Amino acid sequence: MINFNQLRNFYHTAKNRSFTLAAKRLYITQPAVTAQVKSLEDYCNLKLFKKRGRTIYLTDEGKTLYEYARKFFEYEKEIEDVIEDMRELKRGVLRLGTTKAYARYFMPFMITGFHEAYPQIKIHLNEGSSSDMIYSLLDLKIEVAIIAKAEDHPDVYFTPFSQEEMVLIVAPDHHLARKKAVSFKELAEEPIIMKEIGSGTRKLINELFAQSNCTPNVLMETSNAEFIKQLVQRGDGISFLVREAVASELRENKLATVPMEKDIFLDVSIAYLKDQHLSPSARAFLDTLKKLRSPDMTPQGIGWLMAKMQAKRKRTSDS
Amino acid sequence: MINFNQLRNFYHTAKNRSFTLAAKRLYITQPAVTAQVKSLEDYCNLKLFKKRGRTIYLTDEGKTLYEYARKFFEYEKEIEDVIEDMRELKRGVLRLGTTKAYARYFMPFMITGFHEAYPQIKIHLNEGSSSDMIYSLLDLKIEVAIIAKAEDHPDVYFTPFSQEEMVLIVAPDHHLARKKAVSFKELAEEPIIMKEIGSGTRKLINELFAQSNCTPNVLMETSNAEFIKQLVQRGDGISFLVREAVASELRENKLATVPMEKDIFLDVSIAYLKDQHLSPSARAFLDTLKKLRSPDMTPQGIGWLMAKMQAKRKRTSDS
DNA sequence: TGCTATCCATAAAATTATCTTATAAGTAAT
DNA sequence: ATTACTTATAAGATAATTTTATGGATAGCA
C-alpha cells in the first residue's frame, strides 16, 4: 500500500525540482521531504531522482511516477472541492416528505424559495399520508416532513408550522348547502367520504365527531383528494378538505362549503428525527421555513404564507 | 489538505457498510477506523454515515464522497501497478549511447536479445563519437555507452567488452592493394582519411603512427564512415575501419584490405558513470551484455559475438 | 582562489498521528 | 433474559513524521 504522504512529498519535489522548495510549499523542513522521498524510493525499489552537482533531475521512472502523481493530486483537489461544495450547499440533496395536498398546493412555493437560495441542491419530494411520512423519516428515506401530526412518535420532533382551515364540502345542490352553521351531530347522519387512515385530516375529523359524541357515517375512504371532490360534486356524499385544496372548485361553483358551528383547523407540523443529525441542506430548508413563519410565531394558514411569499418574490425581483 | 488515511478508512467502511469489517480489511482494530472516519467527518463538517440500530448507512454526502473515494483508490491501484511494472522491467526506458559503426553493425543484435527478454522496455539509442558519448553520460542523457575508450574520465567506469579488428582499406586498384604486410611508416606517405577527433578509431590509429615515430598524412577527417568508404573506393585516400563495417564492400570488391605487419584491434568498452545509480533497465542491459561475453572473459570481436547470438536465437526458437 | 550562500544528506530528538487495549452501551437474535 | 455482535469512547502504546542541528558539496561572486 503506497504511502500518500511520501507520494505528496515526491510530487512537490518533482514539481519544483528541489527538495528545499517542496519543503517550503508544504510548510515543513527540507530534511522531512528528503526523508519521505527516500522512503518512497525504498518502497518502490527505484531511484526517482538523479543528482548532478546540487541540482536534481527526475529519472525516467521518476518522470513516469510524477505524471501519475500529478493526476492523483489533481483528483485530490476535485475531492476537496466536492466536500467544500457539499458543505457550502453548492451541491447536495434535500429529501422531503409531505402530504399530497401540501405537495400540490403549498410545497411549490416553499421549494421555489429554497431553490432560489440554493439552486444546486436537488430536491427529492416524497408524498404520502402523515403516517407514511413518519415511517419514511424512521427509514431515513427523508429527513424532513411537513405533515399533520396524525400520531405522536417518541423518535420524531414535531414543530407547529401552520394551521390550515378545513371546510365541509358538499355538492352545490346538496340539502346542507344553504345551512348557516352545522354541527357534527347533524353530519353524523350524512354519508361522508373520508381520507385514508393515517391521514391527519382523518384523525382530526374523527376526533371532532368523537367530541360531539357521535361517529361519522363513512361511505368511503380514499387517499385521493381529487376523487373525493368528484364524488362530493356528484352528490355521493360530503367531506372535509383543506380550503386551499378546493378553492378553484368553490369559485367555479362546482362545490359548496357549509359553515360549521366552529371553524376547523388542521395543525400542520414540521417533523424530523430527534436523534439523527440533519444534513446541511435539511438544516438550510428548516431555516427557510422558519423565515416563512410569521414573526410572532402565530400559526398561519397556507393562504397567508403564499401571499407573503409572493410579496417577497415580487420585492426581490423588483430590486 | 484532506487526510488520505481518513479517506481510506472511510472508503472501506462505506464499501463494507461496517466499521468492524473495514477494520478487518485494513488489518487494524475497529476503534482505529471509527476514530479516522470521525476525524474525516470533522474535517468535512459533514455527517458521512447515519446509524439506525446497529447498522450504518451512508448519508447523501457520504454517498457522493464514496463515489469519489472509489475512483481515487482505483487510481491508487494504478499507481502501484506502474511502480510494480517499472520495478519488474515491464515498463521503462533504456538510454544507450554508442558509435555509429556500432549502432549499425552490432547494436541491433544486442538490442534484439535485450528486447526479447524485456519486450516492454523502450530503447533510446544515442549515436556519436566516443567522446560525445562520454559527455552524454555526464549530462545524464544516457546511462550506458558502448564505445572505444578514446579518453579516460575520472567519473566514468570503463569495462572492456570486445576487441574489434581494424583493417586498412584501399581502393581495389590501389598500389598498396597487393602488399602482404605494410607498416605505419610506409603509410605515413599516403593521404589518409581519418575519423573525427574524439573517435576511438582516430585515437588508436594516431597512437599506432606515433609508436612508429611518424605522423599520418591526414587528407580529410569526417565522422561519416560511409563517406570514408566512398572516398577510399574512388582512390582519394586510404583509411582504417572496423572490419565488420566494410564486410560487404570487401565481398563485392569495391574495397580491398591490406594486411598490416601486426593486426590492429580497437578496444571497445562498456561505460557508465561511477557515482550514479543505474536504472533497472540499464542494469538488466549490462547483465545481458555480460552473458554475451565469452565465459573466459577473453575480449572478442563483433563477428564472434554476432555468431554466438545468432546461435542462441536459433536454439531458443527451435525449442 | 577563497568566501559565501545555497542545496541536499544524515542523525538524534521531539512531536504528532495512528493504533491497540479495554470497556461501555446499544441492538438483534435465540 | 441471555448471548452475540456492532459502534463509541478513553487512555496508553506504538509508529510515523517532523524538527533541530549539522556536515559536505557546489555554484556564484569578489
Image (cartoon, coloured by chain):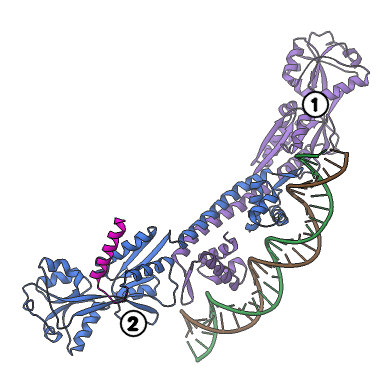
Chain colours: A blue, B purple, C brown, D green
**Callout 2, which amino acid?**
Asp
Q: Is residue B277 above or below residue A298?
A: above
B54 or A182: nearer the eye?
A: A182
Q: Residues within 10 Å of mark 2 (few under 14, many from 20)?
A: few
Chain for disc number 2: A
Image quadrant for the C terminus of chain A? bottom left
Residue A318 percent coordinates (x, y): 29, 56
Q: In which quarter of the image is the N terminus of chain A?
A: bottom right
Please determine whether, in this image, residue A132 is positioned above or below residue B226. below
Residue under pointer 1: B198
Q: Is A310 one of the magenta-colored residues?
A: yes
Count up the numbered dots.
2
Q: Which amino acid does label 1 sit on?
A: Gly
**Magenta stretch: includes residue B313:** no
Q: Overall secondary structure of the magenta stretch?
A: helix
Please state which of residues B167 and D17 is positioned toward the viewer in this rendering.
D17
Q: Which mark is residue A152?
A: 2
- Residue found at x 35% / y 78%: A158
- Chain ID at mark 1: B
Q: Is mark 1 on a helix, strand or loop?
A: loop
- Please give the name of the residue rendered at 56% of the width and 68% of the height, measured from the top-left corner: B39
Q: In this view, does B6 lie to the left or right of A161?
A: right
Viewer-proximal residue among A271 and A314: A314
The quadrant in which residue A262 appears is bottom left
Residue A106: percent from left, percent from top: 26, 67
Q: What element carries label 2?
A: loop
Write down the quadrant of residue B97 in the picture. top right
For residue A3, say whether it is visible.
Answer: no
Magenta residues, start to end: A295-319
Is residue A50 visible from the viewing direction of this image?
yes
